[in-house]
Image: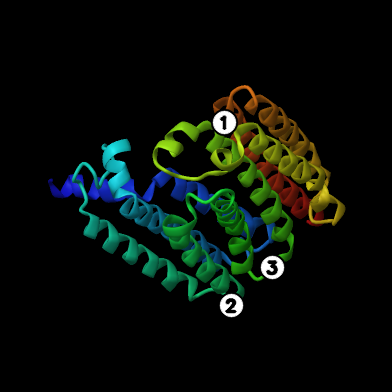
Amino acid sequence: MTAGETIRGLLELTRPVNVLAASVLTFIGAFVAGGVGSYPLQTGAAVAATGLAVGAGNAINDYFDREIDRINQPGRAIPRGAVSPRGALVFSIVLFAAAVGLALTLPLEALAIAGINLVALVAYTEYFKGLPGLGNALVAYLVGSTFLFGAAAVGEIGPAVVLFALAAIATLTREIIKDVEDIEGDREEGLNTLPIAIGERQSLYIATILLVIGVAASPLPYVLGYFELEYLLVVLPANAIMIVAVYESFEDPTIGQTHLKYGTFLAALAFIVGRAALEVNVL
């Protein structure tokens, strides 16, 4: 392999789209907390640390899954020989170290969240990935915690707590539906996901209950005075999209989890709109 192919392989290991998405969520957390303008350096450090940690987590995931990927994903960087297993491991360690270095510049609360998340990323790949429900819950926590991390980086974690909970519930719902979608492949790989353990429809019922709880709680940021009415004007359509998506999942999990993702993106936008409207009204 040439140096260019190796560099491309290393970049692929990080899953750039996932890195970008997680970094944006951290920025939203800082924005919702009202600290982007007041603490730009801390916000930048938190966003960069998130991207590095997610990239490291994806790389270490490919390292542990390299034997399975030789069969199911031969085009990935390690199976096709662009990056050696040792190279992927070293690369992930370097990224983790850089993430920790940036986190050390942040307040104690943010540092604690970063430490917990780094451990959780490795633990998910090695221990929790195939456990019924637990792997899903850990992924949901990690996604939701990006908002907490961004808020903690600017010293105001309160408004992001509700955002964390709502994001975690939506993510857990989508993870369960995605496991229903992937049930055949997961069964072949020997994983014991929730749909395999308790059945597809039972899993979808659990996903539905979780989403209903999240939808019912979604007005809380407005009720608590964190956001203006504009938040509700955006989050309510997002709720409707997600409810329809869960209903669709009983017939087609692929369509359902895709539409649920669109709903969660719109819900994240609602937090930005709600906070922006609050700042405008204050001015």
Query: Which residue corresponds to mark 1?
Result: 258
Q: Residue at x 40, y 36 (%)?
A: 188
Inspect this view and state whether residue 73 appears.
Answer: no
SS state under label 1 = helix
Inspect this view and state whether residue 176 appears.
Answer: yes
- Of badges 3 and 2, nearer the viewer stands 2
Query: Which residue corresponds to mark 3?
Result: 156
Query: Which residue corresponds to mark 2?
Result: 108
The three-letter code of the residue at mark 2 reads: Leu
Numbered mark located on residue 17 in the image: none
Mark 3 to mark 1 CA distance (whole Å): 33 Å
SS state under label 3 = loop
Mark 3 to mark 2 CA distance (whole Å): 12 Å
Q: Is residue 246 above or below residue 118?
A: above
Seen in the image, is 82 located left or right of residue 92? left
Q: Is residue 251 above or below residue 283?
A: above
Q: Is residue 213 above or below residue 164?
A: above
Compare marks 1 and 2 and give the one earlier in the sequence. Answer: 2
Seen in the image, is 65 located left or right of residue 201? left
Mark 1, other Cα within 10 Å: few <14 / some 14–19 / many ≥20: some
Seen in the image, is 55 located left or right of residue 3? right
Q: Which of 1/255 is in front?
A: 255
Q: Which of 180/244 is in front?
A: 180
Q: Which of 149/80 is in front?
A: 80
